[in-house]
Amino acid sequence: MFRYESEMIPVLVENLSRVFNTEYITTEFSTGNGVADLVFTTEMNDEKLFLNDYGMMSLFVRLFQQNQMLNLELLYENSFDKNRLKKLLNCLEGGDFICIEGDKITRTRKYKSHTRNLFSVEAKLKDWKSGFYQAMRYKFFSHKSYLAYPKQYIHRVDLELLKENNIGLISVELDNIELVFKPKTEKPKDVTSYFYLSELFAIEIRKKACA
């Protein structure tokens, strides 16, 4: 069977690409809360806006996710980081996301995350519990989170625990996988993290396409 966890990754990539009919898949994806062995989406969006900074994304979500109109003077008066606010507004105006007329800021279109969804996978060779806890952490940005484990040891995993926490389970053989438990789609627990990591994911995918 597998000697190292890294040997499971190519099997997962090949088979998940087939099962979910997607080419948008990456490995060793840094999330800010651990490195996910594998992250993928079923569809990319055509969003052109890239903020390239978690702080900027956090400010963007706070100010523009719900508000259709804002007052420029009041924003600056209440801002703790005026330089970041200015940088964000310039970026949004340049991306035709907002229109600024005097002190009036109007949102001109709705932001679309760069991915339609994000699914994460944590692969473990022996210690399934640590994989379970890591998969739980990935729920802060994922719509579905999975634990991948070798088929010969799959009986050791507490399936009921995974079901209670909506963590998927993937059984991995040398050349095949089985979705033992398919989790329900959930909204990511942190929308800022999802938007930001969706952006980073899109950048990685574009780099691969150009390589």
Image: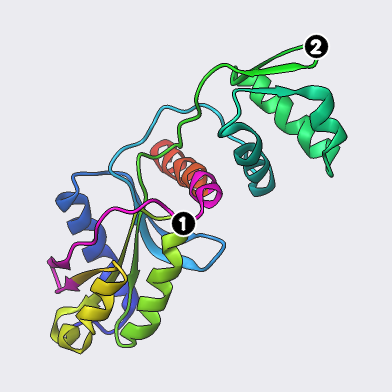
Q: Position of residue 105 (x, y in %)?
A: 70, 19
Numbered range of the magenta stretch: 171-196
Please say whether residue 136 is one of the residues in the magenta stretch: no
Residue underneath mark 1: 189
Horizontal arrangement in the rendering, residue 177 relative to residue 121 (left or right):
left
Q: Quadrant of residue 39?
A: bottom left
Which residue corresponds to the image point at 32% horizontal and 44% vertical from the top-left? 24
Which residue is nearer to you in this view: 191 or 210?
A: 191
Horizontal arrangement in the rendering, residue 47 relative to residue 50 (left or right):
left
Q: What element carries label 2?
A: loop
Q: Looking at the image, is 101 positioned above or below residue 30?
A: above
Residue underneath mark 2: 102
Label 1 and label 2: CA atoms lie apart by 36 Å
Q: What residue type is labelled 1?
A: Lys
Task: Pick the quarter of the image with the C terminus.
Answer: top left
* Crowdedness near tag 2: few (<14), some (14–19) or many (≥20) residues, C-alpha within 10 Å: few
Horizontal arrangement in the rendering, residue 117 relative to residue 10 (left or right):
right
Q: Looking at the image, is 147 positioned above or below residue 186?
A: below
Q: Which colour scheme is used?
A: rainbow
Q: Where is residue 191 in the image (x, y as percent from the top left)?
A: 51, 48
